[in-house]
Image (cartoon, rainbow, N blue to C red):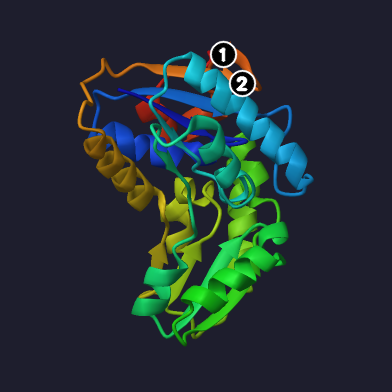
Amino acid sequence: MIVALIDSGLGLLPTSAWLRRLRPDLDLVLSLDPDGAPWGPKPEPWVVDRVLGAVRRSLDRGAQVIVLPCNTASVTALPHVRELVGPGVPVIGTVPAIKPAAAACDSVAIWATAATTASRYQADLIEQFGNGAKVVGVPCHGLADSIDLGDRAAALAAIDSAAARTPDDVSGVVLGCTHYPLLADEIAARLPDGVTLFDSAEAVARQTLRRIDGLGAAGEGSGTVEVFVSGRPGALPPSAEAFDAGRLLGAIKA
């Protein structure tokens, strides 16, 4: 069984790592786009075209399931991907874990990129899933970029800045960018005791496995990891080795 995961950068690592832990036999096709990253500020048609190109390459490699572990790709390209692949190929998108956070906490902060924090998309999610909780957005300037570069010092500085701007009464923090779970421990260490982190990587991985089970004819794979870098066969960048998820997946360029 071949599962393709598509993101502009290292945001695909948390979900990919969960799939590796839960089903180490799955063959994974990882598509990153450093030439086009970040996707968030780009025009929607450009992002759709970029995502569909990665989907086509994944299908050419035999992908039977498509996962978009990226909020930007999910909100802009998900219906286009489903139209392209048809009903026989499951497509799983990603949504920030606002619903479970708001159900468990009276006051929630959503850590996300500046573009996502200011977006209509996030405002709509808060309105739909806020469940009466107090929800505030906290832009994490430079955090995703620092993670992609493997620049730990810059990432920790971005985390410190976001923590300082997070209201004291918050009891839950939603990691609203799929890059951020790579530094979940470091984020938790900079928040007050008792604050719960919420991210969607494990939930997306488990939903992917449910969809695989629903195919009925899903055989085991050999646990390979194949990487495309802006459409070219390649490897995960060396920065991936800075994170447990990257080391778990291997396929890192020397």
What residue is drawn where x is 64% and y is 56%?
158
Q: With 63 as the anchor, is 8 left or right in this view?
A: right
The alpha-carbon separation of the residues under discs 1 and 2 comes to 6 Å
Asked which secondary structure carries label 1, the reply is strand
| Residue at the disc numbered 2 | 229
Query: Is 223 or 144 nearer to us in this picture?
Result: 223
Looking at the picture, does residue 107 appear above or below residue 210? below
Q: Where residue 58 appears, x then y in whole percent?
A: 50, 21
Decide if residue 252 is in sight here: no
Q: Identify which amino acid the numbered label 1 is placed on.
A: Gly
| Contact (Cβ within 8 Å) of mark 1 with mark 2 | yes
Instruction: Name the residue: 70% across, 64% down.
Output: 119
Identified at 38% across, 32% down, the residue is: 88
* Relative image position of residue 206 (x, y in whole percent): 29, 46
Which quadrant holds residue 146? top right
Give the crowd class for mark 1: few <14, some 14-19, many >=20 residues within 10 Å.
Answer: some
Dot 1 corresponds to which residue?
234
**Image height of 208 relative to 94, above or below:** above
- The three-letter amino acid code for the residue at tag 2 is Val
Q: Earlier in the sequence, mark 1 or mark 2?
A: 2
Q: Quadrant of the N terminus?
A: top left
Dividing the picture into quadrants, the one containing residue 48 is: top right
Q: Nearer the viewer, residue 146 or 96?
A: 96
Q: Is residue 47 above or below residue 123?
A: above
